[in-house]
Image: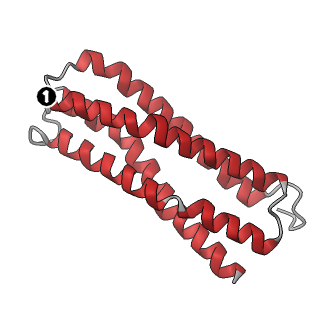
Amino acid sequence: MTKLLLSLHVLAAILAVGSITVAASMFPRHALRALDGGEREGGQDEGQGTGVAALLHRICRGYAVAGVTVPVFGVATGAALGVLTDAWLIASLVLTAAAAALLALAILPGQRRLLALAGHAPDPAAARPMAARLTMLTGVFNVLWAIVVVLMIVRPGSTTGA
């Protein structure tokens, strides 16, 4: 059962968190393109930036919901392995909660605000600081997940020699 739980945990992390990190990282560029009046870049049609940005936002929202399974399977795996009180797992859970809060409270609302600007008389100058902040927050989100991955592999105090 432990192998199944661990497999589901890793698959959920790859599919959900991986999708969010890619989509969230791409979002600010496409939102700014939409705000810049659908600049033609590489033969793209006007309005495509808005459509792509909206799609990336939907991907982030949808996979955020699916991402709830990552800590659920992680805690179940930790319980099966008897490591729920290990410092590396507690630190991973705290970082996971911080990443989830950042996504829910800052990144997704920031994406909504940029999409709303693109839908109304766009002002690219006003949107650039918002997009820059969103890019920074997404970078922090990605770094938090990278740290969690390292903790999962290295597992300080592990007897596996990793």
How many numbered circles are shown?
1
Image quarter (top left, top right, bottom left or bottom right) of the N terminus: bottom right
**Residue at 69%, 52% in the rendered image:** 93
**Residue at 17%, 36% in the rendered image:** 41
133 to 100, vertically: above or below = above
53 to 16, vertically: above or below = above
Percent across and percent down for residue 37 are: 13, 28
- In terms of image quadrants, where is residue 53? top left
- In terms of image quadrants, where is residue 126? top left
Where does label 1 land, which residue? 37
Farthest residue to the top: give it. 125
Percent across and percent down for residue 22 are: 42, 49
Left or right: residue 89 versus residue 130 is right
Left or right: residue 1 versus residue 39 is right
Farthest residue to the bottom: give it. 1
Percent across and percent down for residue 144 are: 61, 43
Give the secondary structure at mark 1.
loop
Three-letter amino acid code at disc 1?
A: Gly
**Residue at 23%, 46% in the rendered image:** 52
Left or right: residue 88 versus residue 62 is right
Left or right: residue 10 versus residue 133 is right
**Residue at 53%, 38% in the rendered image:** 102
